[in-house]
Amino acid sequence: MRHWSCAFLCLLIASTIAAAPPESHHASTDKQLIIDGSIVHDVGRLHLNITNFGLIGSHYTLGAPYSWAPSGRWPGAGGVNHLYGAGLWVGGVRLGQRLVSTGQYAFEIQASPEPEDVIYETAWDAAQAVRYPFGDPDDDGDGFEDEDPPNGFDDDDDGDVDEDGAGIGSQQFRAEMTDTYSTDIFPDHEPLQLAIVQNSMQWMADDVADFVGFEYVIRNSGEETIAEVYVAMFSDFDIDDPQGSGGEAADDMVGFASQAVEAYPGQWVDVEVAYAYEGIGATASGYMGWLPVGEPGQIGVRAFQHYSGQAPFDQGGDPTNDFERYESMSEDNVDGDSVAPADYRNLISVGPFAELAPGEEMSVSFVLVAGADLDDMLRNAGRAQLVYEGLAFDRDGDPGNGDEFVVRWLGPEEIAVPILDPGEEAGDTPPADGIIRLTAAPNPFNPTLEVKAALPRDGWVRASVVDPRGREVRVLHDGMASAGSNSWLWNGRDGSGRTLASGVYLVRLETAERVMQRAVTLVK
């Protein structure tokens, strides 16, 4: 843990007119940095405070107004904090000068003075947040999709605010920030002139409940091209193991893993994770780390660096200026795993991205992932990568042109709730836990797919098939169904008996309580 002066924290608080009230994630008074710990990912097992001033986590030992909030608390509310604080770093060369804007330790990335720049909450099934293929993504019927996201502004100039977004996950927080309004606190900071949208997402389904995804859209809002861009996540993992013997900070270990993992039986995924764990007497804590995610083979780790103690940078201490920070991000180097417990900070970077011209934007994503041990954390990292990859759909009706529409960040509840373990089926008796279960097998299939639904009680059910362009092509059942197992067959044809093209379809099950979907693949 890095020791901060009280004066520095007071400057941050003084720059905030008021904090958003805990009961609201949207305030519209003066500029509001969310410093009360009211914005928390808590629908999964990894509980995490989110801010709009660059900080991820809560500095849980600092005594700040937000320090009471969970800071990488795992597993669940009864777990322990694993993260003191983390933040995005963006580095680049502008007018020949190497510059880095940071979310941690310095709050150089934070909300603008606009009163609308707070934090907005949505989800995949929220109103005015439909995204393809789960209904019509043109929420306001103006011919455009997802053009007015939750940000407090009328982005499409139609007189309505935030009426056409795209919700992701069971819980999503969206914040818009910049690196140009922090020079009053950090007068030596030379901004890159960036506008940054941070989307953080979490899922509640059991097999993907151990991570939080972060998608950053980074736009050059200045007038000069930024070259040799690197993006990193800087973290201070201080694991608060009540059974440990070295305090929160001084007894941690760090490491880096780059390998293929079996995310699900028979499904292998390449991951690269910078992680930390308790090094002395650990009994109650687990492993936690950062995973860059992207299109397979198109993104890779540039550097993994770890720092400890209060030594100068060239002796293993933290980078303290832009030259040292940029060197850490851009050096093609992976530090070895730690060999002794200490108070470590680490950095994992991706790049270089060639350049970012004025007005251009780029997207980079990371995942904070946890697990009971190294293998468990890496398995969860593999599942996070698969959630990021999502599914590809043929929206233009030409499956052979290679122009599939890719929907990123798809969790099981957005496809089907719940996802069953391989080989598990919707049983013949009503589910004892009261949960509706949906299966579709074999998958992929040709020529026939069996759809099964296990219902906890008698009731109305509609089972249908939706094509890659969101159109209902076949109704399998529309009427009453009995408690227990119900099954229907689909032969890959539409309602008129025409054979459908191969590709991904959605089996949709609607009941009085909920709507769920499962992706299936028709092959020829």
Image (tube, rainbow, N blue to C red):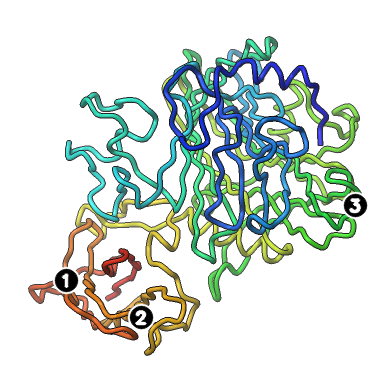
When the figure is inspected, residue 291 is found, relative to residue 433, above or below; the finding is: above
Q: Which disc number belongs to residue 24?
A: none
Q: Residue at x 54, y 66 (%)?
A: 207
> How many angstroms separate mark 1 from mark 2 (CA)?
20 Å
Amino acid type of disc 3?
A: Val
Q: Disc 3, disc 1: CB below 8 Å?
A: no
Which quadrant of the rendered structure holds the N terminus? top right
Q: Disc 1, disc 2: CB below 8 Å?
A: no
Q: Which disc number belongs to residue 474?
A: 1
Q: Which comes before the other along the chain, label 3 or label 2?
A: 3
In the rendered image, which residue does mark 2 sit on?
454
> How many angstroms separate mark 3 from mark 2 (CA)?
51 Å
Amino acid type of disc 1?
A: Arg
Q: Residue at x 53, y 17 (%)?
A: 193
The part of the image, by quadrant, that contains residue 325 is top right
Q: Position of residue 483 (x, y in %)?
A: 31, 83
Is residue 252 shown left or right of residue 36?
right
The part of the image, by quadrant, that contains residue 248 is top right
Amino acid type of disc 2?
A: Ala
In the rendered image, which residue does mark 3 sit on?
339
**Closer to viewer: mark 3 or mark 2:** 2
**Which element carries disc 1, helix, strand or loop?**
strand
